[in-house]
Amino acid sequence: MGLRISDILKLKLSDIVKDGDRYRLNIREQKTKKERFFTVLTEAYQNLKIYCLENKIEPDERIFKFTERGVQKKLKQVCDYLEYDGISTHSFRKFFATQIYVENDFNIALVQKLLQHSTPAVTQKYIGIQPQQIETALKKHNYWK
């Protein structure tokens, strides 16, 4: 879904509603104050519901009782153990966006809409389309045919 960690940590089971034969997540992004709507896989909803029941979490309570800082600290411990550098919770959002971009024929408008960026240029910077990549693409393409 590409949510920011701040939005994930605010999730409540009641944020996910039945919509016909699917589940839908309605949230207002903390950073942008924009509304977001997502289809949630039935299996994901069922797993969250079981987790909440097993941990006595009411539908209107936050599902994840962690702070951003706490998540970052645990992620750093895991990355240190695995000897990975430069990974943060935001890295997952960027990776998600880049994968969507590549898997959907490099559709920048789709990724822009998904992340709710104001312009394609913001999205291009965000997913790391660099001038070097553009130059490499041009070299691969023989435009003198």
Image: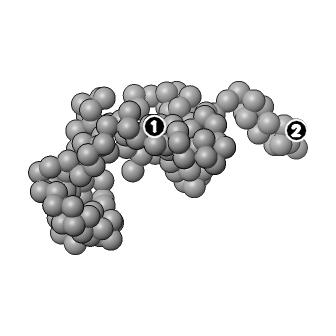
Q: Secondary structure at mark 1?
A: helix
Q: Amino acid at mark 2?
A: Trp
Measuring from the top left, give residue 83's x and y in whole percent: 66, 43
Badge 1 crowding class, 10 Å Cα cut-off, few under 14, some 14 to 19, many 20 or more, is few
Residue denoted by label 2: 144
For the point 46% across and 43% down, which residue is it? 74
Question: Is 15 on the left or on the right of 37, as rendered?
Answer: left
Badge 2 crowding class, 10 Å Cα cut-off, few under 14, some 14 to 19, many 20 or more, is few
Measuring from the top left, give residue 43's x and y in whole percent: 33, 71
For the point 11% across and 51% down, which residue is it? 60
Mark 2 vs mark 1, foreground winner is 1
Is 138 rendered above or below residue 58?
A: above
Residue denoted by label 1: 73
Total residue callouts: 2
Measuring from the top left, give residue 132's x and y in whole percent: 75, 30
Q: Amino acid at mark 1?
A: Lys
For residue 14, what is the image quadrant?
bottom left
- Can see residue 73? yes
In the rendering, which numbered label is found on residue 24? none
Do residues under tags 2 and 1 come within 8 Å of each other at their CB atoms? Answer: no
For the point 49% across and 43% down, which residue is it? 75
Q: Secondary structure at mark 2?
A: loop
Compute the Cα span from label 2 to label 1.
53 Å
For residue 47, what is the image quadrant?
bottom left
Measuring from the top left, give residue 85's x and y in whole percent: 64, 37
For residue 70, what is the image quadrant?
top left
Question: Is 15 on the left or on the right of 80, as rendered?
Answer: left
Decide which of 92, 145 is in the foreground and name it: 92
